[in-house]
Image: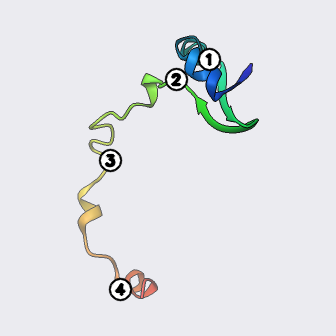
């Protein structure tokens, strides 16, 4: 479900709107009836995790490119 509120409502009901967004509702903040912003929860599964690509790059990555490949980039 999508909830659209104006800026004044958003300022006075921010805690409630944040709870709604965290619960999965889409909250749109509008100015003069036009959408300006969307409140969405920060998902922990989308956070950056260092080391996720460990072992993905082999030594072959650092070898010089063949001449035909280099020519293609010229």
Residue 47 left/right relative to 30:
left
Residue 18 left/right relative to 2:
left
Disc 3, SS: loop
Q: Position of residue 33 (x, y in %)?
A: 76, 35
Of the image marks 3 and 1, the number of the one nearer the N terminus: 1
Q: Which mark is residue 67?
A: 4
Cβ–Cβ below 8 Å for labels 3 and 1? Answer: no
31 over 42 or under it: above or below: below
Of the image marks 1 and 4, the number of the one nearer the N terminus: 1
Mark closer to the observer (4, 2): 2
1 over 72 or under it: above or below: above
Mark closer to the observer (1, 4): 1
Q: Of residues 5 and 44, which is closer to you in this image?
A: 5
Cβ–Cβ below 8 Å for labels 2 and 3? Answer: no
Of the image marks 3 and 4, the number of the one nearer the N terminus: 3
Cβ–Cβ below 8 Å for labels 1 and 2? Answer: yes
Residue for point 61% across, 32% down: 38
15 over 60 or under it: above or below: above
Q: Dot 2 corresponds to which residue?
A: 41
Of the image marks 1 and 2, the number of the one nearer the N terminus: 1
Disc 1, SS: loop
Residues at marks 2 and 3, CA–CA distance in whole angstroms: 31 Å
Residue 51 left/right relative to 26:
left
Residue for point 32% across, 33% down: 49
Residues at marks 3 and 4, CA–CA distance in whole angstroms: 25 Å
Residue for point 55% across, 12% down: 19
Q: Dot 3 corresponds to which residue?
A: 56
Q: Position of residue 11 (x, y in %)?
A: 56, 22
Cβ–Cβ below 8 Å for labels 4 and 2? Answer: no
Q: Which quadrant would the C terminus be assigned to in this image?
A: bottom left
Q: Dot 1 corresponds to which residue?
A: 24
Q: Position of residue 14 (x, y in %)?
A: 54, 17
């Amino acid at each position: 479900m999508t909830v659209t509120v104006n800026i004044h409502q958003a300022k006075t009901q921010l805690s409630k709107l944040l709870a709604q967004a965290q619960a999965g509702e889409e909250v749109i903040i509008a100015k003069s009836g036009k959408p300006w912003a969307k409140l969405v929860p920060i998902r922990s599964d989308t956070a950056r995790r260092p080391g996720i690509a460990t072992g993905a790059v082999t030594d072959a990555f650092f070898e010089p490119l063949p001449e035909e490949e280099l020519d293609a980039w010229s």
